[in-house]
Image: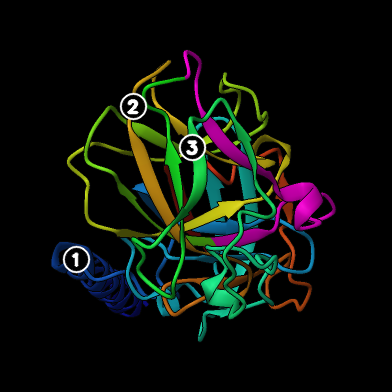
Amino acid sequence: MKKHVLLLLLGLTLVLSAANWRWDTRLRSGAPPRWDTLRTVTYTSVTMGISLIANNALITNISGIGDLTTYVGCKVTISDGTYTAVGWVKSVGVGPTFGTELATTANAISDPNGNESGTTTGWTPTNLNTFGLSGTTTTGTYAFFLNATPVPTNIARIYKDLHTDWALSGTTGALYRLTYSIRHSGAGGIWKAWLSSSNSDGLGTDRGLGDLASTDTTYTSKDIYYVNNINVRYLIFREGSTSNDGGVYLDNLSCKRVSTPGRNGAIIVSTRGGETQSWSSDTGLNGNATSFTVTFSRN
């Protein structure tokens, strides 16, 4: 009897030792743990696009994690440092796929929609010395040109109300892909692009899309994923100080809703093995945060 107990204990020890060896080896090799051995794995400073709207929960463009196939069936908790969203990984993305074009108003920067025209229709200028057309383009015949030199004496800008013009007020939490091409005229100060809660010269709770210096005289293509809410209602291009910041050229504006994630993302459901594409819980996660902490676990 004692011999049988000793053999049983020895066998159990060998099994546990082998399991721990496999776990430790995978961690030391940098490979993600297998789902059947996973307890908790946390990644910090992760950038991503995240859709929080009901029936379209997903994550995409994830940095620093790699292939999410390992985590199919796992619970995922995403934190912005204050608030969290929790769901279950249903499947790895195969897209991405997108909805229809939103920037459909014909003007000098509507090239992606195929209806470019020599107008500035759809945008509101404020305090600019010049807001008009230019032949300095990346595609087509026209681009916007914004000039803030030598006047005015207040922050010059153009803006668009996305919630009104693109009817986004009813899609809070949805993920969008915004693209455009931009360059500086070469003289003057910094220009800024923003998604803002206000169209005024001040900047409220919003999201900066990047600065443009006078040395940035070659067109740069911007590719931005953002979560729609009241804090990103207005798209604004503005000079960085109060006056004499020169000018910028703007071209090729496009915006589409993200329908399915790419292979660097996943579809999220509310329960393990479920079909409802929603988050189990969301305490107010800021989908436009600079970075996130992402935790995968079995339970």
Q: Amino acid at mark 3?
A: Thr
Query: Which numbered disc flags the more N-terminal residue, 1 or 3?
Result: 1
Residue 298 coordinates in the image, percent (x, y): 53, 64
Q: Which mark is residue 130?
A: 3
- Specify whether 213 is left or right of 242: left
From the image, tell me which residue sits under label 1: 30
Give the magenta range. Answer: 152-177
Residue placed most toward the observer, 17 or 4: 17
Q: Residue at x 67, y 35 (%)?
A: 231
Q: Secondary structure at mark 1?
A: loop
Q: Amino acid at mark 1?
A: Gly
Q: Amino acid at mark 2?
A: Asp
From the image, tell me which residue sits under label 2: 245
Residue placed most toward the observer, 149 or 34: 149
Depicted 26 relative to depicted 283: above or below: below
Mark 3 and mark 2: Cα distance apart in space: 12 Å
Residue placed most toward the observer, 272 or 129: 129
